[in-house]
Image (cartoon, rainbow, N blue to C red):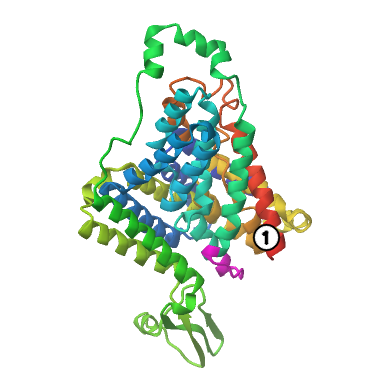
Amino acid sequence: MITLTMILQLLVVLGALWVGSRYGSLALGAISGIGLAILVFGFGLKPGTPPTDVIYIIIAAVTCAGIMQASGGMDWLIQLAEKMLRKHPDRITFLAPLCTFFLTVLVGTGHVVYTLMPIICDIALKKGIRPERPCGVASIASQVGITCSPIAAAVVAFVSISNANGFDITIPKVLMVSIPACICGLMAAAAASYRRGLDLDKDPQFQAKLKDPEQYKYIYGSNATTLDMVIPQSAKNAVFIFLGALVIIVFFAVFQNALPSFETLRAVKGGDALYVDQNLQLTADQLVQAKVHVTGTTEWFNKPLAMNVVIQIVMITAAALMIIFCKAQPKKAVAGPVWQSGMVAVVAIYGIAWLADTYFSNYLGEMKLALSDIVSQYPWSIAFVFFLVSVLINSQGAVVVAMLPLAYHLGIAGPVLLGVLPSVYGYFFIPNYPSDIATVNFDRSGTTVIGKYLLNHSFMMPGLVCVITSTIVAYLLTTIIY
């Protein structure tokens, strides 16, 4: 039964997320700490568990991607994308989102596209295409790729949480659903944007700007490009190392029998006590170090190395190889946008997920009772919850870590949750995310806008079309596969 106290505590959670979103960046995680303190010290709730495994993976992946950026490897990827876009400028509304999508898939963060956005706008202007059309979809695509990246927190968290809740899933199996579903969503959004708005030669506002010499010079006077950059071989080698690391991760995810196995304690029964350890997975040596007194029956089994550990080892090793062989400077990596945005994500997920887990773990029984009828008849309706939470917290990884355990506890099947995975992206709804704001600033024509009424912005239509289409396609795919 839902009580007044539960409602008050939920308002504390939502209030902390809302205030944090107003400040953005690190504030999301830090202000979540205020909500956590109120729940624990004010209401006496038992603290939940912070998502340490996901945080460690983010640190490892972002360090590797940041080192690759410091080596110049990211410049080479951007240059390759620009060459393709300039070769087919008339198709930029479809090709631009594919470029930003696959850049995110490769490096696990959407913050790598800032260099490419001015180029997309420049190509569109030179071709006479309204920049809002490719820019709006490309910004959406840079975030959609997160649920399709083998090293992104959202994907890794989905796999680890699902396995802990009895749904045997691997990273490649997730990508087999999310990648084709999200590409379908992006192409639908691009098709919807293809004739969006007035053509530049028929737009009275744009034509009025061109009559001002200063505005004309601002719009057409510069040429954003990376084609004149000389990319050293060391930068290309860094990309090859990074791609090699991704291949190794996917290989071990598919062939887990190739991983080393370690003896792990499953259960200890002694007298009136039963000690079960499937989540902590203590090894024999760790059990001895912890001085656990064992009597009665013990059961041991060999378990392959967990994929979250594999990802961390491979990513850190790849980062080290780039430093040694590719002239990557660690100080430059720390100052780069990829590493900095990744560390912001760590703090955000740390605070948000810990706050959410504290609230939901204390009221699982009540929530099952209140929501069991809805989720049993319409299990796909959890997609609306994922989307709404994402609107609040601006992090797909945090949505997965905070809400997926609750979804499993409500009895929703793993294939259903995989089918609605694209719905964890909803923070385009309120245009305060850095990639959207940056895209508005990069569009010199002024056609990519945040509207007067906030929600009538350039990202709303492509975002809704993409997420709705992607979720429907992913749901259909999981229905067929499972």
Give the image location of residue 203, x and y in percent.
Answer: 56, 14
Residue appearing at x 53%, y 64% in the figure: 172
Residue that label 1 marks: 478
Provide the residue span drawn in magenta: 162-172
Residue in front for this viewpoint, 152 or 95: 95
Q: Where is the N terminus found, in terms of image quarters? A: bottom right
Residue 287, quarter of the rendered image: bottom left
In the image, farthest residue toward the front: 87
Q: Where is the C terminus found, in terms of image quarters? A: bottom right
The amino acid on which the numbered mark 1 sits, given as a three-letter code, is Thr
Residue in front for this viewpoint, 23 or 136: 136
Residue in front for this viewpoint, 432 or 358: 432
Left of 191 or right of it: where is 222?
left
Give the image location of residue 205, x and y in percent.
Answer: 53, 11
Residue appearing at x 67%, y 60% in the figure: 478
Give the image location of residue 476, x and y in percent.
Answer: 71, 55
The question of residue 170 being in magenta is answered with yes
Residue in front for this viewpoint, 312 or 103: 103
Give the image location of residue 296, x and y in percent.
Answer: 51, 93
Residue appearing at x 58%, y 60% in the figure: 176
Left of 296 or right of it: where is 27?
left
Compared with 93, 354 (above or below) is: below
